[in-house]
Amino acid sequence: MPQAREYYDALIIGAGFSGIHQLHHLRKLGLTAKIIEAGSDLGGTWYWNTYPGARVDSELPIYQFSDPELWKDFTFSEKFPGWQEIQKYFQYVDKKLGIKQDVIFNSRVASAAWDDSDDQWAVTTEDGRVFHSQFLLLCTGIGSKAYIPNFKGLETFKGEMHHTSRWPKEYNFEGKRVGVIGTGATGVQVIQTIASEVRHLTVFQRTPNLCLPMRQRQISKEEHDKKKEDLYPILFNRRNQTFAGFLHDFDAKLTLDATPEERAIFFEDKWEKGGFHLWLGTYIDLFTDEKASDETYAFWRKKTLERISHLPTELQEKLAPVKPPHPFGTKRPSLEQSYLEVYGRPNVTLVDVSESPIEEVTPNGIKTADGVEHPLDVLVLATGFDMVTGGITSIDIRGQDGIPIKEKWNTEGVRSYLGLAAATYPNMFWIYGPQSPSSFSNGPSSLELTSEWILDMIKYMKENNISSAVPTEGAQHAYSELVNQLGQTGLWFKAKSWYLGCNVEGKRVQMLQFPGGIPAYAKLCNDSANKGYDGFDLK
Ligand code: N01
């Protein structure tokens, strides 16, 4: 007997912050919806990234849902919570909202195809289940597809090997020689956490991380409670008014308009505050004027050298070189707690692979171009992700013309309308993805903004009997050009960063996120909505 078609008004891919937000509010609109999730629990990035030391770089209270029903009864214990506590938060959210009952776990979506004849998506999972829906919501996050460089001999390594986003539940590094490739946000966290546990740690660094002090601290329930009633609503509102959805914002002054004394006081204040204050809370021209960036770098280097003045000069130069490796902040700085001190430990070696690249992975370790073989029992790949686009392009998504989105983006570059939809892919929206503020912003701030906008549009469609909506080629072209132009006005292209796709071999280099800040982005979205969703073909 033929099986009944499994149909929902909306299918959501991914059970992280964005997917949960969509599901909860779609149900409130009276729509049927399911999340399809590759993992076996909620959390998205926080389900997968359980490597030692994984914690968020956005401070409380803004790294959570803004719904008072959710924040009123949950208390995080640290200013920058770790993955264990964030996982608990997701369980709490589930208890409050009953999310899991509408999640299909352990199912990875392989493909999605649009059918113009019935205005529906057919979504197929890797294990062959087929679902149909009117709407398709891609909530795949910016870092869901791990990236492992094509190191010669990688498969020959005889020890344990882990990419940080596929961390084993059980591990024990005691007495082991561990190598970490990568000093991005992930590498910094792993390195500072495991250095004291392992027999020897070899860090393979290609670019120094211009990391900033986290200034972590415990926050008591009483402290939270005092702020919740009066302050939290104001703080959550403030998230939509700043460039990056944080509580701090750029200072309107230009770096060189400040006197050296003013600058010294200003920078010192940002440094003492910690977190991203010296990055996304500094003078407004950090990303547009190289001299401003040099001034910021000089301050960063002075403060960093104070911490590592006891190390050999050559090592100091590798961690905080005289010449900036890139304009300050054009690669994402990490927040660290004890990262720099690690290099003073007798069991830690830094190998500069910008000087001597990794030539091959051998059965016993890593051989660098200078002929040295570094013996290892464990290899940690903190080599990042096919950022921003990888979650979407790893699904075979075909729209009205049958062309996979991956193929289109490879040949034409990433193109979208408002960083949430693409021409020829009707009723498909993504959240916290390409050409939205995504990785230039605090996750929950920008994903709630986009998610709410999409929900409003779906509501509008339902109320007006519109069965499909697709961006016009013209609107997509104009928006994508704007993103590209804004990207060119900054210093971004002076760095080889994942913001531009430079980290993945063969990936097209372009500005992958909207670099104009959340308020400007929100205005573009609202302008379209206020004109009856201008830029979309509605039918
Ligand atoms: O990845 P990355 P990540 N040989 O791409 C190195 C978010 N996140 O996982 O800089 C040698 O930044 C590469 O070197 P280089 C956050 O948005 C957030 O660390 O390209 N080295 C780099 O050092 C973050 O930015 C949090 O020269 C090679 C590293 O691998 C994003 O995810 C925590 C190499 C990759 O760094 C990605 O961070 C973690 C090669 N062939 C992640 N190839 C928090 O909120 C690559 N590398 C705390």
Image (cartoon, rainbow, N blue to C red):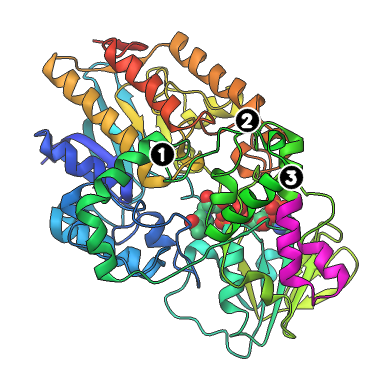
Amino acid tagged 3: Pro
Give the crowd class for mark 3: few <14, some 14-19, many >=20 residues within 10 Å: few
Q: Earlier in the sequence, mark 3 or mark 1?
A: 3
**Lateral position of residue 31 relative to residue 239, left or right:** left
Measure how far apart labels 3 and 2 are at the Cα level.
Answer: 36 Å
Q: Earlier in the sequence, mark 2 or mark 1?
A: 1
- Segment tinted magenta in the rendering: 298-319
Q: Position of residue 464 (x, y in %)?
A: 14, 13
Nearer-the-camera pick, 315 or 223:
223
Mark 3 vs mark 2, foreground winner is 3
**Lateral position of residue 326 relative to residue 38, left or right:** right
Residue at x 84% of width, y 50% of height: 323
Name the mark on residue 510: 2
- In the rendered image, residue 311 lying in the magenta stretch gets the answer yes
| Label 3 with label 2: CB-CB less than 8 Å | no
* 249 relative to 309, above or below: above
Judging by the rendered image, the residue that carries numbered circle 1 is: 432
Nearer-the-camera pick, 140 or 88:
88
Q: Position of residue 14 (x, y in %)?
A: 33, 47
Q: Position of residue 374 (x, y in %)?
A: 79, 76
| Label 3 with label 1: CB-CB less than 8 Å | no
Judging by the rendered image, the residue that carries numbered circle 3 is: 260
